[in-house]
Image (tube, rainbow, N blue to C red):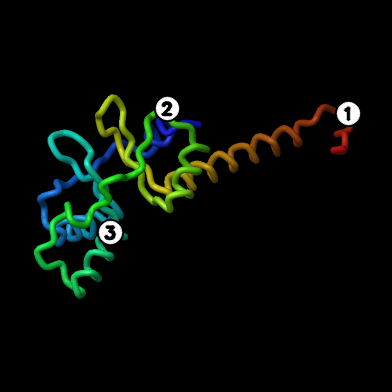
Amino acid sequence: MKVSDILRVKGGTLFTITPEDSLADAAKSMAEKDIGSLVVMSHGRVVGMLTFREVIQAVVKNGGTFGSTTVYRAMDSGPLICTMETEMDEVRRMMLERHARYMPVINNSLLMGVISFYDVAKTVVDSQNFENKMLKAYIRDWPEGEEPQPAA
């Protein structure tokens, strides 16, 4: 399974912000849209990621307020990225290694979407549920007169 399979089901709704925007506006946008991340874009390019983790860290660093902090000062300027062709096993490995909850999907320098750890987990569970249903159907329809062989 590839990243393109997740985006096909999830859809391509994108939420972006610029580095010059205020952190307070970014947090307000995240709260209003009930999202955990914003892709930071400048001149049509992904330049960073802003997640609730970076927002909280910046607020704590600033004594509990947003102050005049910009997105640029709080964002992760080196986010993990993947492509539409990246395999799910690779995405899971990358996210676990870096403790990343969100990953922009880039195709030919264009932002195609964002996948979250939730999206990955849901895809794995859905895939396992489908496989379980197929196995149960296969067992129910076992040909008469043939006994299943125990695993060795």
Q: Secondary structure at mark 3?
A: helix
Dot 2 falls on a residue whose secondary structure is: loop
Q: Residue at x 38, y 29 (%)?
A: 84
Mark 2 burial class by Cα count in 10 Å: few <14, some 14-19, many 20+: some
Image location of residue 5, percent across then percent down:
43, 32
Name the kind of residue labelled 2 in the image: Glu
Q: Secondary structure at mark 1?
A: loop
Q: Nearer the viewer, mark 1 or mark 3?
A: 3
Tell whether label 2 touches label 3 (CB within 8 Å): no
Q: Quadrant of residue 82?
A: top left
Residue linked to disc 3: 54
Single out the mark in the foreground, 3 or 2. 3
In the image, is 17 to the left or to the right of 76?
A: left
> Residue drawn 23% across and 60% down?
31
Q: Position of residue 96 (x, y in %)?
A: 48, 49
Instruction: Find disc 2 in the rendering and name its residue.
Output: 85
Q: Residue at x 59, y 38 (%)?
A: 130
The amino acid at mark 1 is Glu
Task: Residue 7: give x, y in percent of width and height.
Answer: 37, 35
The quadrant of the picture occupied by the C terminus is top right
Category of crowding for the residue at label 3, using alpha-carbon neighbours closer than 10 angstroms: few (below 14), some (14–19), many (at least 20): some
Pick the residue in front: 62 or 92: 62
Query: In 3D space, how far apart are the residues under numbered discs 1 and 3 (Cα atoms)?
Result: 60 Å
Toward the bottom, the furthest residue is 63
Mark 1 vs mark 2, CA separation in Å? 42 Å
Residue identified by numbered label 1: 146
In the orientation shown, which residue stands out farthest toward the top? 108
Give how far across and how far down residue 94 sits, in percent: 46, 43
- Nearest to N terminus: mark 1 or mark 3: 3
Q: Relative to 17, say whether 151 is above or below.
A: above
How far, Cα to Cα, is label 3 from label 2?
Answer: 28 Å
